[in-house]
Image (spheres, rainbow, N blue to C red):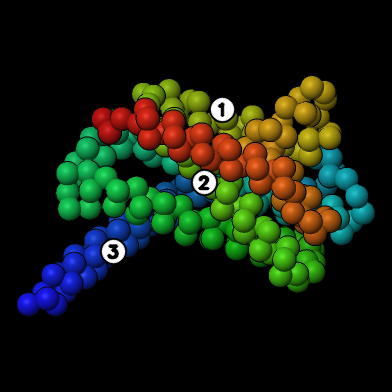
Amino acid sequence: MSTLPATSESGGASSAFRRVLAQCRFETAAVLRNGEQLLLTLVLPLLGLTVMLRTELLPVPGHPGARAAAAVAGVVALAVASQLTSQAIGLAFDRRWGVLRLLATTPLGPRGLLAGRLGAVLVVLAVQVGVILLGGLVLGWRPVPDLPVMAGGAVLVVLGAAAFVALAVLLGGTLRAEAVLAVANLLWVLMAAGGGLLVPAQSLPDPLATAVEFLPSGALGEGLRHLAISGALDLRAVAVLIVWAAVGTWAAARWFRWE
């Protein structure tokens, strides 16, 4: 008799995991099959990488090896930041069409829905980073294998993703879909042009250069560039991303609306 509850609990946990996994596959496929999403998550970052490695239009300091490493790091940061635009727009229109409200009443539940979306974000990020690194290799970037650097890069990417997804949930869960569409795309352009993702903060005029380092885009871009060039983890960038992730998560949990 004592084993029955454990078996039931195990079966329930297993069923919940399968539901979350199925939602994760669905969300991932929805992103990878959407031409607009692919443009944002893969095509534009690869175009930016080509421009940065083949031209001198963007100010990337240092010798050729350092320039290539900084360029790849900046484009990875851009790919991570694109999750804000992608997730915010997706959430906003799912709210508008009542999809979130309906899914939240299914056995998947609100937590399962959010877990599935988070899993999809991680899968898409892994695809993005893999494609960007492969593109860098094709364009002449030659990385030096270093386990601490790879571990530090993974930490920054995960923290950056947490911060941008939290902000995406806040944006997509509070504003009207049309407003989110405009604001999210505008934020992507501003972050790419002057938010520290592609252009190093020191290349920007003061006081913008100082302010950018305390934004999630600037912290991620500067942190990844510093790591790629020096091999050292920028602890200030880590702290800034942690603060943004924590504040964004709290605000999203406080004000998010399912419909």
Q: Is the N terminus in the top left, top right, bottom left or bottom right quadrant?
A: bottom left
Picture disc at residue 119: none
Among numbered discs 3 and 1, the one appearing first in the sequence? 3
Q: Position of residue 202 (x, y in %)?
A: 84, 35
Query: What residue is shown at x 18% (from left), y 72% (from top)?
Result: 6
Q: CA distance from mark 3 to mark 2?
A: 21 Å
Amino acid type of the residue tagged 3 in the rendering: Phe
| Vertical order, 189 against 80 (above or below) | above
Amino acid on which disc 2 is placed:
Ala
Q: Position of residue 7 (x, y in %)?
A: 16, 74
Of marks 3 and 1, the one in the foreground: 3
Q: Percent position (x, y) of residue 145?
A: 75, 71
Residue at 57%, 37% in the rendered image = 244
Mark identifier at residue 162: 2
Q: Earlier in the sequence, mark 1 or mark 2?
A: 2
* SS state under label 2: helix
Q: Residue furthest right?
A: 63
Residue that mark 3 sits on:
17
Q: Residues within 10 Å of mark 3 (few under 14, many from 20)?
A: some
Closer to the eye: label 1 or 2: 2
Q: CA distance from mark 1 to mark 2?
A: 20 Å
Label disc, if present, on residue 186 of the rendered structure: 1
Crowding at dot 2, Cα within 10 Å, few <14 / some 14-19 / many 20+, comes out as many
In the image, 197: left or right of 19? Answer: right
Apparent side of residue 168 relative to residue 46 in the rendered image (left or right): left
Amino acid of disc 1: Leu
Rendered image quadrant of residue 105: top left
Left of 176 or right of it: where is 130? Answer: right
